[in-house]
Image: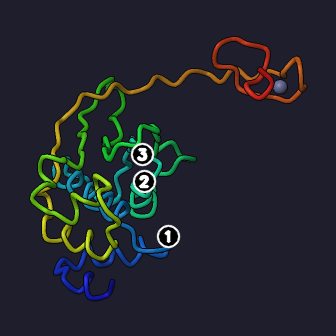
Amino acid sequence: MDEVIAKIDDPEMLSQIEKLIPFHGHPSTGAFIGLQILNIARRVLDIKDDERVFVICETLNCVPDPFQIIWGSTVGNKGLKILDYDKIAVTINKIAKPGQTHVKGVRIFLDPEKTVEYPALHAWYMNERKVPHEEAISELIKAGDDVYTWDFVDISVPVKAKKDVRLCTICGESFISNDGSDICKGCS
Ligand SMILES: [Zn+2]
């Protein structure tokens, strides 16, 4: 893997990878894809280092990790939302300014029409054979932005409603009721 990483000439990406690998636990093709997506979003949305970023990741697998460790967009701080669609696609937007109801975001996905040009990566993506992550990541480094497609999207800013906290009539524990129900989701 070190040989593969040595091919990266961008010092910023190298320092991102240094943070990402121990966070994720091992080098991973999916986590590297997430990192490339993060860097495309940063460029096209002009995201500064200290800006709060919201991320919607359409898979639970590997791809969410760079957004957590590099941007601090986590599930707990609501910076990261997971849609369990098993798709390699991520939508990113900066925090809205006060009073803004809509904000510009970008949805970026790994495009199979483009990965075709990179046989090992494409074989990994389509699960045609077992591809070692060194091989897939090596092609990702070669490809750079070439294998991604993105579109700008209009994102509506969620309105913060007061939390409706109730005691569940079955278990007696407190919970936030989102639909006026008196029974918590664990009991219903
Ligand atoms: Zn309950």
Q: Which mark is residue 23?
A: 1
Would you identify the image quadrant in which residue 12 lies? Answer: bottom left
Q: Earlier in the sequence, mark 2 or mark 3?
A: 3
Of the residues shown, which amino acid type is indicated by label 1? Answer: Phe
Would you identify the image quadrant in which residue 43 lies? Answer: bottom left
Residue identified by numbered label 3? 59
The picture places residue 130, in percent across and down from the top left corner, at 35, 66
Q: Earlier in the sequence, mark 1 or mark 2?
A: 1
User: Which quarter is ligand 1 in?
Assistant: top right
150, 168: nearer the viewer: 150
Q: Nearer the viewer's eye, disc 2 or disc 3?
A: 3
Which residue sits furthest front?
129
Label 1 secondary element: helix
Local crowd size for mark 2, using a 10 Å CA cut-off: few (<14), some (14–19), many (≥20): many
Of the residues shown, which amino acid type is indicated by label 2? Answer: Pro
Q: Nearer the viewer's eye, disc 1 or disc 3?
A: 3
